[in-house]
Amino acid sequence: MNKSQLYRQLNVQVDLAVEAHQLLRGESGEEIPGVIMDEQTLDHAKVTIITVETDEGVDAIGKPKGQYITIDAPEIRTNDYSIHDSITQILADQLTELMGLREDASVLIIGLGNWNATPDALGPQVISKTMVTRHLYQLSPDDLKGKLRKVSAISPGVLGTTGIETAEIIRGIVDHVKPDLVIAIDALAAGSLERIGTSIQLADTGIHPGSGVGNPRAGINEETVGCKVIAIGLPTVLNAAIIAHDAVEGIFKEFVTTPSLYKLYKGIKPEVLSKIIDDVLSPFQGNLMVTPKEIDSLIQTTAKIIAGALAISIHPGIDREDYERYLQ
Amino acid sequence: MNKSQLYRQLNVQVDLAVEAHQLLRGESGEEIPGVIMDEQTLDHAKVTIITVETDEGVDAIGKPKGQYITIDAPEIRTNDYSIHDSITQILADQLTELMGLREDASVLIIGLGNWNATPDALGPQVISKTMVTRHLYQLSPDDLKGKLRKVSAISPGVLGTTGIETAEIIRGIVDHVKPDLVIAIDALAAGSLERIGTSIQLADTGIHPGSGVGNPRAGINEETVGCKVIAIGLPTVLNAAIIAHDAVEGIFKEFVTTPSLYKLYKGIKPEVLSKIIDDVLSPFQGNLMVTPKEIDSLIQTTAKIIAGALAISIHPGIDREDYERYLQ
Amino acid sequence: MNKSQLYRQLNVQVDLAVEAHQLLRGESGEEIPGVIMDEQTLDHAKVTIITVETDEGVDAIGKPKGQYITIDAPEIRTNDYSIHDSITQILADQLTELMGLREDASVLIIGLGNWNATPDALGPQVISKTMVTRHLYQLSPDDLKGKLRKVSAISPGVLGTTGIETAEIIRGIVDHVKPDLVIAIDALAAGSLERIGTSIQLADTGIHPGSGVGNPRAGINEETVGCKVIAIGLPTVLNAAIIAHDAVEGIFKEFVTTPSLYKLYKGIKPEVLSKIIDDVLSPFQGNLMVTPKEIDSLIQTTAKIIAGALAISIHPGIDREDYERYLQ
Amino acid sequence: MNKSQLYRQLNVQVDLAVEAHQLLRGESGEEIPGVIMDEQTLDHAKVTIITVETDEGVDAIGKPKGQYITIDAPEIRTNDYSIHDSITQILADQLTELMGLREDASVLIIGLGNWNATPDALGPQVISKTMVTRHLYQLSPDDLKGKLRKVSAISPGVLGTTGIETAEIIRGIVDHVKPDLVIAIDALAAGSLERIGTSIQLADTGIHPGSGVGNPRAGINEETVGCKVIAIGLPTVLNAAIIAHDAVEGIFKEFVTTPSLYKLYKGIKPEVLSKIIDDVLSPFQGNLMVTPKEIDSLIQTTAKIIAGALAISIHPGIDREDYERYLQ
């Protein structure tokens, strides 16, 4: 049995490139042609940069060409605020480089997700903490120049509350606001529990709203929107099928010393295992999220880190010492 | 002294056509050329239809050509739910006629205003109670046909929280959603206290977001948006200058028997009175709202009436008996 | 391996008496001494009444003596509002009988849980929809008599946001308000997925706030509070360990035709299986919830059903035809 | 005509001691026996301490014996965050002295007011930003000692949403939590516009919930609650009658050069003026608030200042440099 085959059978989506990469490598143990990985270990965070370079890489990893930066910072789950400051700065540094903003660039920040559903509210929470400045430029452009860039921000809601695909709404707004850069923030689905609330992914490839919850829709990316799109994502849930799979795997690993048994397990066809897991999860047809009880405070903490890093990286006049003042 | 001159001096906006009309008539006592008024008295509501027909009418009343229907229903402020039902049906009837929807028409409902500021939250509150159906049409069009029309809905936020003019956002969305009709819901400023929370205005002339709070911006109307726009407005506040003015007028009326004094009052120039009122209101430069203490429950009640009337008038399969089931 | 032993090992709590009963019966296949079960099948709901009569029953089922009424209504998850009406009436009928209110009785409704965490917000949501009347009695007692009973209501928050045990807050309030009956509403943990959002439990034995999330605290019941306490609970989450267990069980059942294997599975000690599942769930030490993606709308729907049933059963003047008017 | 007589006629309440004092002094120009006033001018704030010492003072000023500290800081309305920091520290200093907390003292913070009505939501907003610590003491008392004191916090809601007098709820909670100090935070009514959102009053005399909105109820003070009660209040609204009065006064002052006219004005009996103003405000019988359009952001800013000052003054381990980290 092969984990990535199984995930496909179960319709389990792997949102983080670093997890998709791990899944692939885990099996083959080999380099993936067309995909480069680079790791740095910093105080309080590990930064992994995966670059999908060729079409061959795209086919292997199932993600568009581009850069995927993951900041793994398990200490987000502590309440140590000076560590949160450090993580905010690390995120800001990566964002600054990835954005490469011109001095007079304007940025539109989009908070994807549903503000009424805790684990899906990351985007709207970041927006509610973000100071907008675009409209102030009409009043006092000279005061702001060199200190604050033009920022606009919106949480467009989700298909179920608007009746409109999020991508349609965003394209419409971009047509009129004409930002130089769109930053879209979304809650993701993790492939493993320890990443929930602690891994932040930046990608210069845009985003597919709702993809984290199973229904692929029109993407939000440079091609469809007409300007560069950076996606910031954080896993807040896990597909319940992964828990089910891991438990089964765990029990067989326990019996690894009974070779006949382990062989039996390895021989189970993905479609058989997938059917069993489907049956276990059937009352909600797989639309089940696993989420920690502390998810609402994790969302608060990470929304503050992301909003803080956006303030530092977008505005030349805001730094690590004073960013908290500019959060709403 | 002339009230409408004074209001202009004080920058007091009269959002309701019925009040603008009253203000004009009150002075001249004469018919206004190019403006027709029609009144009906129903159980629990008075319906006044003002039609601005000619350019001369536009100049006089200061409103674009079109129909302005006001439903005055002071009993909204009671807690009698069967009366609220009647008012909902009256509003639905007027809406049905004004909209003139084709069988397969689609409607985009916009909730203007700021959901964080109670008296400005009418629009977002109506949206939060409105069932959207547009996206369901992709799944089961035949089940819905003839029963539910396509409805999408959004609360785009306000300039201060998005950095984007609301009209820009709406135009962008309309370009992509292409509805047959836009309905925009907004909190208005009243010209007199008794209309707060009790007068609902429908207009087929569109809306100017923010105009109720003093900053005129690009309009949302057929010309700018590309489809018919119906505005639904309800006064939730009063400009504080009106209270100041009315108190002064009240005191002089008291002395109407002292002719010299009343003459003196009538002789005060609008700019003098306006300056005095400005001074009284100066710490907030006139940006003051007068609102009843019960405003949050008035908003809840009226949002339910409006959302109910929208459900009844838009969807053929929903009527007075069952509309409450379809409110979120 | 024995499921209820395993649940104890895994610290999985079974909130619904009907599930605790099933778990016990499932193993022994026998009647449980001191526990009586009665079932009725109605249109749109099955009503199961479990009565724990003796100390022997208490020991077996792990619940205090008293009545546990479960209304299983899977059609809650449909959007058919007339079915929701029927379920509301069924719940109201059971509540009326269980409460046995005197004509002039007063009721205090408590919404337990955290309004910032979607699956835990059931109680606060019911409170926000509930009309309070106790304070109106001071103004117009004669108008209300025979129509509306005295209702007060509060959502006291949770330990993490107040720093105070919920039971302490409630006892303090009861000491001063002196209601005849306390009704406490709480989100529960289910033992199986299909009960999430669809099984409503009424119990005349009171409640243990927070017990649904693992930390037992001082109870809210007649003994500690000084008046009758009825608990209304609805499962909104599932312990993730149950998913893990069920997947393992599913895979072995698949191999039931390989007797040696199934025997092996049956021979696994609860502590071994428990350890494996603990490892799978380790990053959050078992503090993981499984919840359907649609949980926010399920909470809205069920909060309306519960608030509606409370209105009908508490107030003589409110019935199935008009209860929606009295919901806030 | 005498302003304080008129206010009594109009049922206009003067919540700030500093304004009640001004009103009295304004008329007589003399010292008020039994009332001492002390003023300090600091950077960014003026601190006025009024001490009501004798029964004679109580009768004159209409406030219980005790200390009333007002911090007037008009720069709250700017967006200069370093000034906000200074004001936070000034408030913290006054609070520290007024509280005089023992090392192991515990504090219960009460957020009065209605979180659904923007100008009344100050108290709940402060609570939502406040970190509670009381429950952590059960887990790790030694870690916290000397750094954090025990804080619990609750927003009990208002009579209209609970059906229970707030004072009853608080007394019940205090009986069980047994804090050394209660701090009650409430939105007040100002006597003049420029104090809205910019004057913070501390009083060691407790509070009367709802008094700011016209209905006097049982007090929350040492006598009724059993421990010291400090009230923190901030005006967020103005009674509309004051605007009406000031406009009338303004117009007559304009004609001060016409002695006969000014004499006429001075001769108007308070009951005549009061009746005229009542008529102007009649549709809502005086239950009208005047509030600036920017009230929601003013509430956010001041809630942060108050929550920050509470954190600094209550917890020895938190200071001006790091308090923002401890705000929720």
Image (tube, coloured by chain):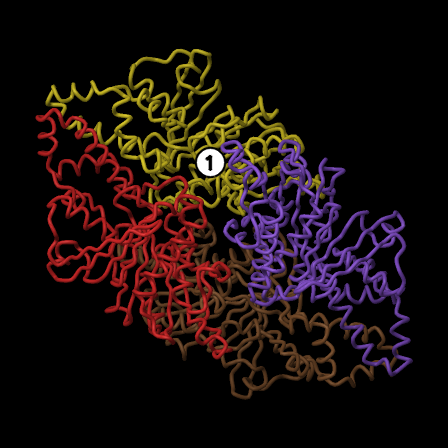
Chain colours: A brown, B red, C purple, D yellow
Residue linked to disc 1 = D89
Element at label 1 = helix
Q: Quadrant of residue D146?
A: top right
Residue drawn at (47%, 22%) of the image: D67
**Residue A220 in picture, x, y percent from top left:** 44, 74
**Residue D141 in picture, x, y percent from top left:** 70, 39
Chain of the residue on which disc 1 is drawn: D
Quick one: A57 or B147, which is closer to the camera?
B147
Q: Is residue C194 left or right of residue C261?
A: left
Res. A142 in view: no
Res. A246 in view: yes
Residue drawn at (51%, 42%) of the image: D124
**Residue C322 in picture, x, y percent from top left:** 52, 52
Quick one: C310 or D222, which is closer to the camera?
C310
Q: Quadrant of residue B229?
A: bottom left
Q: Amino acid at mark 1?
A: Gln
Residue drawn at (51%, 38%) of the image: D158
